[in-house]
Amino acid sequence: MNKLGVSITNKQILRLAAPIALALLIPQINFFTNTVFLGRLGERELGLNGITGVFYLILSMIGYGLSSGLQIQMARRAGEGDKVGLARIFGNGVMLSVLFSLVLMLITLWTVPLLFGFSLYDSNNFSLSVSFIYIRVWGLPFLVLSQLFNSFFIAINRSRMLIYGSVAATIANVVLDYGLIFGHGGLPAMGFNGAAVASVTSEGIGFLVMVCMYYYKRLHQAYPVSFFRYFDIGLSQKSLKVASPLIIQFMFSIGGWLVFFIFIEHLGGQALAASQVLRNILGIVMVGTWALATTCNTMVSNIIGQGRQNEVLLTIKKVGKLSLIYAAICCVSMLVFSHEFLSIYTEDASLIQFSIPSLRVIVVATLAMALSTVAFNGVVGTGNTMVNLTIEITCVSMYLIYSYFVIHRWQSPLYICWGSEFVYWTSLLITSVWYLKSNRWKGKQV
Protein backbone atom coordinates (compact mmCIF):
# COMPACT_ATOMS: atom_id res chain seq x y z
CA MET A 1 0.00 0.00 0.00
CA ASN A 2 1.23 3.51 -0.84
CA LYS A 3 1.45 5.39 2.48
CA LEU A 4 1.88 8.68 0.65
CA GLY A 5 -1.50 8.38 -1.10
CA VAL A 6 -4.45 10.48 0.09
CA SER A 7 -8.12 9.60 0.49
CA ILE A 8 -11.08 11.83 -0.37
CA THR A 9 -12.78 12.45 2.97
CA ASN A 10 -13.64 15.62 4.87
CA LYS A 11 -11.39 14.40 7.68
CA GLN A 12 -8.42 14.01 5.32
CA ILE A 13 -9.10 17.39 3.72
CA LEU A 14 -9.25 19.16 7.07
CA ARG A 15 -6.24 17.24 8.41
CA LEU A 16 -4.16 18.54 5.50
CA ALA A 17 -5.70 22.03 5.44
CA ALA A 18 -5.54 22.92 9.14
CA PRO A 19 -1.72 23.12 9.44
CA ILE A 20 -1.53 24.88 6.07
CA ALA A 21 -4.08 27.43 7.33
CA LEU A 22 -2.00 28.03 10.45
CA ALA A 23 1.16 28.43 8.35
CA LEU A 24 -0.63 30.90 6.06
CA LEU A 25 -2.07 32.73 9.04
CA ILE A 26 1.42 33.51 10.32
CA PRO A 27 2.40 35.85 7.43
CA GLN A 28 -1.00 37.47 7.74
CA ILE A 29 -0.31 38.08 11.43
CA ASN A 30 2.94 39.71 10.33
CA PHE A 31 1.02 41.94 7.90
CA PHE A 32 -1.52 42.58 10.65
CA THR A 33 1.21 43.56 13.14
CA ASN A 34 2.88 45.88 10.63
CA THR A 35 -0.45 47.50 9.79
CA VAL A 36 -1.47 48.03 13.41
CA PHE A 37 1.91 49.46 14.47
CA LEU A 38 2.37 51.60 11.35
CA GLY A 39 -1.20 52.84 11.68
CA ARG A 40 -0.07 54.38 14.96
CA LEU A 41 2.77 56.19 13.17
CA GLY A 42 0.47 58.00 10.74
CA GLU A 43 -1.83 57.83 7.73
CA ARG A 44 1.07 58.06 5.25
CA GLU A 45 2.92 55.07 6.74
CA LEU A 46 -0.31 53.07 6.89
CA GLY A 47 -1.02 53.76 3.23
CA LEU A 48 2.51 53.07 2.02
CA ASN A 49 2.50 49.77 3.87
CA GLY A 50 -0.20 48.80 1.38
CA ILE A 51 1.87 49.61 -1.71
CA THR A 52 5.16 48.16 -0.45
CA GLY A 53 3.34 45.18 1.04
CA VAL A 54 1.67 44.32 -2.27
CA PHE A 55 4.96 44.80 -4.14
CA TYR A 56 6.73 42.35 -1.83
CA LEU A 57 3.73 40.06 -2.12
CA ILE A 58 4.39 39.92 -5.86
CA LEU A 59 7.95 38.74 -5.16
CA SER A 60 6.60 36.26 -2.63
CA MET A 61 4.06 34.88 -5.10
CA ILE A 62 6.70 34.54 -7.83
CA GLY A 63 8.60 32.32 -5.40
CA TYR A 64 5.34 30.57 -4.53
CA GLY A 65 4.84 29.87 -8.23
CA LEU A 66 8.17 28.06 -8.33
CA SER A 67 7.43 26.04 -5.18
CA SER A 68 3.91 25.23 -6.45
CA GLY A 69 5.36 23.82 -9.66
CA LEU A 70 7.77 21.69 -7.62
CA GLN A 71 4.91 20.70 -5.31
CA ILE A 72 2.88 19.37 -8.25
CA GLN A 73 5.82 17.17 -9.24
CA MET A 74 6.55 16.03 -5.67
CA ALA A 75 2.86 15.26 -4.99
CA ARG A 76 2.68 13.26 -8.21
CA ARG A 77 5.74 11.22 -7.19
CA ALA A 78 4.16 10.76 -3.74
CA GLY A 79 0.99 9.43 -5.36
CA GLU A 80 3.15 6.99 -7.35
CA GLY A 81 5.03 5.93 -4.19
CA ASP A 82 8.35 7.08 -5.69
CA LYS A 83 10.35 8.39 -2.69
CA VAL A 84 13.65 8.59 -4.57
CA GLY A 85 12.10 10.63 -7.39
CA LEU A 86 10.44 12.92 -4.86
CA ALA A 87 13.73 13.45 -3.04
CA ARG A 88 15.56 14.27 -6.30
CA ILE A 89 13.01 16.96 -7.13
CA PHE A 90 13.25 18.45 -3.64
CA GLY A 91 17.05 18.44 -3.45
CA ASN A 92 17.45 19.97 -6.88
CA GLY A 93 14.66 22.41 -6.02
CA VAL A 94 16.74 23.81 -3.13
CA MET A 95 19.55 24.77 -5.50
CA LEU A 96 17.08 26.09 -8.06
CA SER A 97 15.33 28.20 -5.39
CA VAL A 98 18.59 29.78 -4.19
CA LEU A 99 19.55 30.75 -7.72
CA PHE A 100 16.04 31.97 -8.49
CA SER A 101 15.80 34.18 -5.39
CA LEU A 102 19.18 35.84 -5.99
CA VAL A 103 18.26 36.74 -9.57
CA LEU A 104 14.92 38.08 -8.38
CA MET A 105 16.70 40.22 -5.77
CA LEU A 106 18.97 41.83 -8.37
CA ILE A 107 16.06 42.57 -10.70
CA THR A 108 14.12 44.13 -7.81
CA LEU A 109 16.96 46.41 -6.69
CA TRP A 110 17.28 47.70 -10.24
CA THR A 111 13.60 48.14 -11.14
CA VAL A 112 12.05 49.49 -7.91
CA PRO A 113 13.18 53.15 -8.35
CA LEU A 114 12.00 53.10 -11.96
CA LEU A 115 8.61 51.60 -11.12
CA PHE A 116 7.80 53.79 -8.12
CA GLY A 117 9.28 56.90 -9.75
CA PHE A 118 6.95 56.45 -12.70
CA SER A 119 3.80 55.55 -10.79
CA LEU A 120 3.76 57.43 -7.46
CA TYR A 121 2.77 61.10 -7.54
CA ASP A 122 4.05 62.10 -4.07
CA SER A 123 7.88 62.40 -3.79
CA ASN A 124 7.84 61.52 -0.08
CA ASN A 125 5.85 58.39 -0.86
CA PHE A 126 8.48 57.49 -3.48
CA SER A 127 11.53 57.86 -1.21
CA LEU A 128 9.94 56.01 1.73
CA SER A 129 8.76 53.14 -0.49
CA VAL A 130 12.13 52.63 -2.23
CA SER A 131 14.02 52.74 1.07
CA PHE A 132 11.66 50.13 2.55
CA ILE A 133 11.94 47.70 -0.40
CA TYR A 134 15.73 48.01 -0.49
CA ILE A 135 15.78 46.54 3.02
CA ARG A 136 12.85 44.16 2.66
CA VAL A 137 14.20 42.36 -0.41
CA TRP A 138 17.04 40.76 1.59
CA GLY A 139 14.55 38.39 3.14
CA LEU A 140 13.66 36.92 -0.25
CA PRO A 141 16.08 33.93 -0.26
CA PHE A 142 14.79 32.83 3.17
CA LEU A 143 11.19 33.21 1.99
CA VAL A 144 11.62 31.25 -1.26
CA LEU A 145 13.42 28.38 0.52
CA SER A 146 10.74 28.33 3.23
CA GLN A 147 8.08 28.04 0.54
CA LEU A 148 9.93 25.06 -0.97
CA PHE A 149 10.13 23.30 2.41
CA ASN A 150 6.40 23.97 2.85
CA SER A 151 5.69 22.34 -0.51
CA PHE A 152 7.82 19.33 0.41
CA PHE A 153 6.03 18.83 3.74
CA ILE A 154 2.62 19.14 2.06
CA ALA A 155 3.58 16.70 -0.71
CA ILE A 156 4.56 13.99 1.81
CA ASN A 157 1.38 14.55 3.88
CA ARG A 158 3.31 16.14 6.76
CA SER A 159 1.67 19.56 6.57
CA ARG A 160 1.80 19.81 10.37
CA MET A 161 5.52 20.53 9.96
CA LEU A 162 4.68 23.94 8.48
CA ILE A 163 3.65 25.21 11.91
CA TYR A 164 7.03 25.34 13.67
CA GLY A 165 8.87 27.75 11.38
CA SER A 166 5.78 29.90 10.98
CA VAL A 167 5.26 30.31 14.72
CA ALA A 168 8.93 31.15 15.28
CA ALA A 169 8.84 33.75 12.49
CA THR A 170 5.69 35.35 13.87
CA ILE A 171 6.96 35.69 17.42
CA ALA A 172 10.19 37.23 16.13
CA ASN A 173 8.32 39.61 13.84
CA VAL A 174 5.92 40.89 16.51
CA VAL A 175 8.71 41.48 19.05
CA LEU A 176 11.05 43.13 16.53
CA ASP A 177 8.27 45.23 15.01
CA TYR A 178 7.47 46.68 18.40
CA GLY A 179 11.12 47.30 19.16
CA LEU A 180 12.38 48.61 15.82
CA ILE A 181 9.41 50.75 14.77
CA PHE A 182 9.08 52.61 18.07
CA GLY A 183 12.56 52.11 19.59
CA HIS A 184 11.60 49.96 22.59
CA GLY A 185 13.77 47.42 24.40
CA GLY A 186 17.00 49.28 23.68
CA LEU A 187 16.54 48.97 19.90
CA PRO A 188 16.81 51.99 17.55
CA ALA A 189 13.56 53.73 16.54
CA MET A 190 13.60 53.15 12.77
CA GLY A 191 9.95 53.96 12.06
CA PHE A 192 8.71 52.68 8.68
CA ASN A 193 12.02 50.94 7.86
CA GLY A 194 11.95 49.17 11.22
CA ALA A 195 9.08 47.03 9.93
CA ALA A 196 11.28 45.95 6.99
CA VAL A 197 14.22 44.96 9.20
CA ALA A 198 11.89 43.03 11.52
CA SER A 199 10.35 41.12 8.61
CA VAL A 200 13.71 40.15 7.07
CA THR A 201 15.03 38.90 10.41
CA SER A 202 11.89 36.92 11.17
CA GLU A 203 11.95 35.25 7.73
CA GLY A 204 15.53 34.12 8.39
CA ILE A 205 14.59 32.72 11.79
CA GLY A 206 11.56 30.91 10.37
CA PHE A 207 13.66 29.25 7.67
CA LEU A 208 16.35 28.09 10.13
CA VAL A 209 13.69 26.50 12.35
CA MET A 210 12.24 24.61 9.36
CA VAL A 211 15.68 23.25 8.42
CA CYS A 212 16.24 22.13 12.00
CA MET A 213 12.87 20.34 12.07
CA TYR A 214 13.67 18.65 8.74
CA TYR A 215 16.75 17.03 10.28
CA TYR A 216 15.22 16.54 13.73
CA LYS A 217 12.39 14.46 12.23
CA ARG A 218 15.00 12.48 10.23
CA LEU A 219 13.32 13.28 6.94
CA HIS A 220 16.76 13.44 5.33
CA GLN A 221 16.98 9.69 5.97
CA ALA A 222 13.49 8.82 4.77
CA TYR A 223 14.04 10.84 1.60
CA PRO A 224 17.67 10.47 0.41
CA VAL A 225 18.37 14.08 -0.53
CA SER A 226 21.87 15.22 -1.48
CA PHE A 227 22.01 19.02 -1.38
CA PHE A 228 24.58 20.77 -3.56
CA ARG A 229 26.19 17.55 -4.86
CA TYR A 230 25.34 18.49 -8.43
CA PHE A 231 22.81 20.66 -10.19
CA ASP A 232 20.56 18.60 -12.50
CA ILE A 233 19.91 20.94 -15.43
CA GLY A 234 17.52 18.52 -17.13
CA LEU A 235 15.37 18.14 -14.02
CA SER A 236 15.49 21.91 -13.45
CA GLN A 237 14.23 22.53 -16.97
CA LYS A 238 11.37 20.09 -16.40
CA SER A 239 10.52 21.77 -13.07
CA LEU A 240 10.60 25.24 -14.65
CA LYS A 241 8.42 24.02 -17.51
CA VAL A 242 5.74 23.16 -14.95
CA ALA A 243 6.42 26.18 -12.69
CA SER A 244 7.00 29.02 -15.18
CA PRO A 245 3.34 29.44 -16.18
CA LEU A 246 2.49 29.54 -12.45
CA ILE A 247 5.22 32.13 -11.82
CA ILE A 248 3.89 34.36 -14.61
CA GLN A 249 0.34 33.68 -13.44
CA PHE A 250 1.03 34.86 -9.88
CA MET A 251 2.94 37.85 -11.24
CA PHE A 252 -0.13 38.85 -13.22
CA SER A 253 -2.48 38.14 -10.34
CA ILE A 254 -0.73 40.16 -7.61
CA GLY A 255 0.66 42.62 -10.17
CA GLY A 256 -2.92 43.58 -10.92
CA TRP A 257 -3.38 44.27 -7.23
CA LEU A 258 -0.30 46.55 -7.25
CA VAL A 259 -1.75 48.53 -10.16
CA PHE A 260 -4.99 48.80 -8.17
CA PHE A 261 -3.14 50.31 -5.18
CA ILE A 262 -1.17 52.69 -7.39
CA PHE A 263 -4.45 53.94 -8.87
CA ILE A 264 -5.86 54.27 -5.33
CA GLU A 265 -2.83 56.39 -4.32
CA HIS A 266 -3.98 58.90 -6.91
CA LEU A 267 -7.31 59.23 -5.04
CA GLY A 268 -5.58 60.56 -1.91
CA GLY A 269 -4.18 59.50 1.46
CA GLN A 270 -7.48 58.51 3.07
CA ALA A 271 -8.46 56.16 0.23
CA LEU A 272 -5.00 54.57 0.28
CA ALA A 273 -5.01 54.11 4.07
CA ALA A 274 -8.53 52.64 4.00
CA SER A 275 -7.56 50.25 1.21
CA GLN A 276 -4.55 49.02 3.19
CA VAL A 277 -6.83 48.18 6.12
CA LEU A 278 -9.30 46.44 3.79
CA ARG A 279 -6.50 44.46 2.13
CA ASN A 280 -5.35 43.27 5.53
CA ILE A 281 -8.84 42.12 6.51
CA LEU A 282 -9.27 40.34 3.17
CA GLY A 283 -5.87 38.68 3.64
CA ILE A 284 -6.89 37.20 6.99
CA VAL A 285 -10.13 35.84 5.49
CA MET A 286 -8.13 34.37 2.60
CA VAL A 287 -6.10 32.20 5.00
CA GLY A 288 -8.78 29.51 5.20
CA THR A 289 -9.74 29.58 1.54
CA TRP A 290 -6.10 29.44 0.36
CA ALA A 291 -5.34 26.61 2.80
CA LEU A 292 -8.19 24.58 1.35
CA ALA A 293 -7.18 25.57 -2.18
CA THR A 294 -3.59 24.40 -1.56
CA THR A 295 -4.97 21.17 -0.13
CA CYS A 296 -7.09 20.74 -3.25
CA ASN A 297 -4.02 21.31 -5.43
CA THR A 298 -1.91 18.60 -3.80
CA MET A 299 -4.83 16.14 -3.40
CA VAL A 300 -5.73 16.40 -7.09
CA SER A 301 -2.13 15.79 -8.15
CA ASN A 302 -1.80 12.91 -5.66
CA ILE A 303 -5.03 11.25 -6.80
CA ILE A 304 -4.02 11.49 -10.45
CA GLY A 305 -0.67 9.91 -9.50
CA GLN A 306 -2.67 7.01 -8.00
CA GLY A 307 -4.52 6.58 -11.30
CA ARG A 308 -7.88 7.80 -9.88
CA GLN A 309 -8.65 10.57 -12.39
CA ASN A 310 -12.38 9.88 -12.20
CA GLU A 311 -12.37 11.17 -8.58
CA VAL A 312 -10.81 14.57 -9.33
CA LEU A 313 -14.08 16.52 -9.74
CA LEU A 314 -15.52 14.91 -6.60
CA THR A 315 -12.45 16.03 -4.65
CA ILE A 316 -12.76 19.62 -5.89
CA LYS A 317 -16.47 19.71 -5.02
CA LYS A 318 -15.84 18.47 -1.47
CA VAL A 319 -13.07 20.98 -0.83
CA GLY A 320 -15.14 23.78 -2.43
CA LYS A 321 -18.07 23.09 -0.12
CA LEU A 322 -15.87 23.36 2.98
CA SER A 323 -14.33 26.58 1.64
CA LEU A 324 -17.75 28.15 1.06
CA ILE A 325 -18.91 27.28 4.59
CA TYR A 326 -15.76 28.86 6.04
CA ALA A 327 -16.17 32.02 3.93
CA ALA A 328 -19.83 32.38 4.87
CA ILE A 329 -18.94 32.34 8.58
CA CYS A 330 -16.27 35.00 8.00
CA CYS A 331 -18.66 37.16 5.97
CA VAL A 332 -21.36 37.16 8.64
CA SER A 333 -18.75 38.11 11.25
CA MET A 334 -17.48 41.00 9.10
CA LEU A 335 -21.00 42.33 8.54
CA VAL A 336 -22.05 42.12 12.19
CA PHE A 337 -18.77 43.46 13.62
CA SER A 338 -17.67 45.84 10.85
CA HIS A 339 -16.76 48.71 13.18
CA GLU A 340 -14.89 46.43 15.58
CA PHE A 341 -12.80 44.87 12.77
CA LEU A 342 -11.79 48.24 11.38
CA SER A 343 -11.05 49.82 14.76
CA ILE A 344 -8.29 47.25 15.36
CA TYR A 345 -6.22 48.95 12.64
CA THR A 346 -6.93 52.61 13.26
CA GLU A 347 -8.36 54.92 15.89
CA ASP A 348 -9.48 57.44 13.26
CA ALA A 349 -13.30 57.43 13.41
CA SER A 350 -13.67 59.13 10.02
CA LEU A 351 -11.41 56.56 8.35
CA ILE A 352 -13.43 53.72 9.90
CA GLN A 353 -16.71 55.18 8.67
CA PHE A 354 -15.20 55.80 5.24
CA SER A 355 -14.12 52.13 4.98
CA ILE A 356 -17.40 50.41 5.93
CA PRO A 357 -19.16 50.54 2.49
CA SER A 358 -16.06 49.01 0.85
CA LEU A 359 -15.93 46.30 3.51
CA ARG A 360 -19.46 45.26 2.53
CA VAL A 361 -18.36 44.90 -1.09
CA ILE A 362 -15.47 42.70 0.04
CA VAL A 363 -17.91 40.45 1.88
CA VAL A 364 -19.72 39.65 -1.38
CA ALA A 365 -16.43 39.11 -3.24
CA THR A 366 -15.23 36.74 -0.51
CA LEU A 367 -18.01 34.24 -1.29
CA ALA A 368 -16.95 34.11 -4.94
CA MET A 369 -13.31 33.84 -3.87
CA ALA A 370 -14.04 30.82 -1.66
CA LEU A 371 -15.15 28.75 -4.64
CA SER A 372 -12.90 30.19 -7.34
CA THR A 373 -9.62 29.61 -5.45
CA VAL A 374 -10.47 25.95 -4.92
CA ALA A 375 -11.59 25.41 -8.53
CA PHE A 376 -8.54 27.22 -9.88
CA ASN A 377 -6.13 25.22 -7.69
CA GLY A 378 -7.90 22.09 -8.87
CA VAL A 379 -6.81 23.10 -12.35
CA VAL A 380 -3.26 23.68 -11.02
CA GLY A 381 -3.21 20.17 -9.55
CA THR A 382 -3.93 18.60 -12.94
CA GLY A 383 -0.50 19.85 -14.04
CA ASN A 384 -1.59 21.77 -17.15
CA THR A 385 -0.08 25.03 -15.94
CA MET A 386 -0.30 26.74 -19.33
CA VAL A 387 -4.09 26.60 -18.97
CA ASN A 388 -3.75 28.24 -15.53
CA LEU A 389 -1.71 31.01 -17.09
CA THR A 390 -4.27 31.58 -19.84
CA ILE A 391 -7.10 31.73 -17.31
CA GLU A 392 -5.15 34.12 -15.08
CA ILE A 393 -4.24 36.50 -17.90
CA THR A 394 -7.88 36.62 -19.00
CA CYS A 395 -9.23 37.33 -15.52
CA VAL A 396 -6.54 39.86 -14.56
CA SER A 397 -7.13 41.69 -17.85
CA MET A 398 -10.81 42.08 -16.95
CA TYR A 399 -9.77 43.24 -13.47
CA LEU A 400 -7.37 45.86 -14.86
CA ILE A 401 -9.85 47.16 -17.42
CA TYR A 402 -12.38 47.65 -14.63
CA SER A 403 -9.77 49.33 -12.38
CA TYR A 404 -8.51 51.63 -15.14
CA PHE A 405 -11.91 53.05 -15.99
CA VAL A 406 -13.58 52.99 -12.56
CA ILE A 407 -10.59 54.26 -10.53
CA HIS A 408 -8.15 56.02 -12.84
CA ARG A 409 -10.53 57.57 -15.35
CA TRP A 410 -13.78 58.06 -13.45
CA GLN A 411 -12.37 58.57 -9.89
CA SER A 412 -15.31 56.58 -8.48
CA PRO A 413 -16.13 56.18 -4.76
CA LEU A 414 -13.89 53.66 -3.01
CA TYR A 415 -16.58 51.02 -2.53
CA ILE A 416 -17.16 50.92 -6.30
CA CYS A 417 -13.40 50.67 -6.85
CA TRP A 418 -13.29 47.57 -4.65
CA GLY A 419 -15.92 46.00 -6.91
CA SER A 420 -12.90 44.95 -8.97
CA GLU A 421 -12.47 42.02 -6.56
CA PHE A 422 -15.89 40.67 -7.46
CA VAL A 423 -15.09 41.00 -11.17
CA TYR A 424 -11.86 39.04 -10.78
CA TRP A 425 -13.08 36.19 -8.59
CA THR A 426 -16.29 35.63 -10.55
CA SER A 427 -14.48 35.42 -13.89
CA LEU A 428 -11.88 33.08 -12.32
CA LEU A 429 -14.62 30.76 -11.07
CA ILE A 430 -16.44 30.60 -14.41
CA THR A 431 -13.33 29.87 -16.49
CA SER A 432 -11.91 27.29 -14.04
CA VAL A 433 -15.17 25.34 -13.80
CA TRP A 434 -15.53 25.37 -17.58
CA TYR A 435 -12.06 23.87 -18.06
CA LEU A 436 -12.52 21.19 -15.37
CA LYS A 437 -15.83 20.07 -16.87
CA SER A 438 -14.30 19.90 -20.35
CA ASN A 439 -12.07 16.96 -19.22
CA ARG A 440 -9.20 18.34 -21.32
CA TRP A 441 -6.89 17.98 -18.33
CA LYS A 442 -6.94 14.17 -18.36
CA GLY A 443 -3.71 12.37 -19.26
CA LYS A 444 -1.38 15.31 -18.49
CA GLN A 445 2.11 14.08 -17.45
CA VAL A 446 4.35 16.02 -15.05
Image: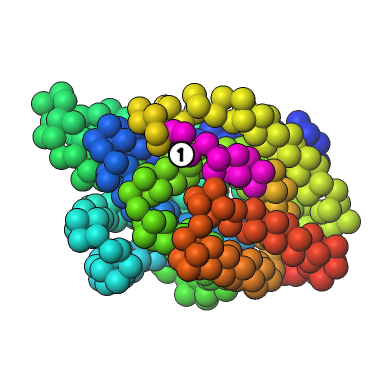
Front-lying residue, 249 or 338? 338
Question: Which residue is found at the position 25% from the left and 38% from the top?
Answer: 42
Q: Amino acid at mark 1?
A: Phe
**Rendering coords of residue 138 (x, y %):** 27, 54
Residue 112 location, quadrant: bottom left
Q: Is residue 212 visible?
A: no
Q: Is residue 138 above or below residue 157?
A: below
Q: Quadrant of residue 434?
A: bottom right
Residue 176 visible to the viewer: yes
Residue at position x 29%, y 37% in the image: 38
Q: Position of residue 377 (x, y in %)?
A: 67, 55
The magenta stretch spans residue 114: no
Which colouring convention does the figure follow? rainbow
Query: Dot 1: few (<14), some (14–19), or many (≥20) neighbours within 10 Å?
Result: some
Q: Which residue is drawn at the image coordinates 47% and 75% (left, top)?
A: 233
Along the horizontal axis of the image, is 300 left or right of 167? right
Q: Give the image location of residue 418, x and y in percent.
A: 55, 51
Report helix, strand or loop for mark 1: helix
Magenta region, residue range? 352-366
Q: Which residue is mark 1?
A: 354
The one of 219 and 57 positioned closer to us in this rendering: 57
Q: Is residue 337 above or below residue 360?
A: above
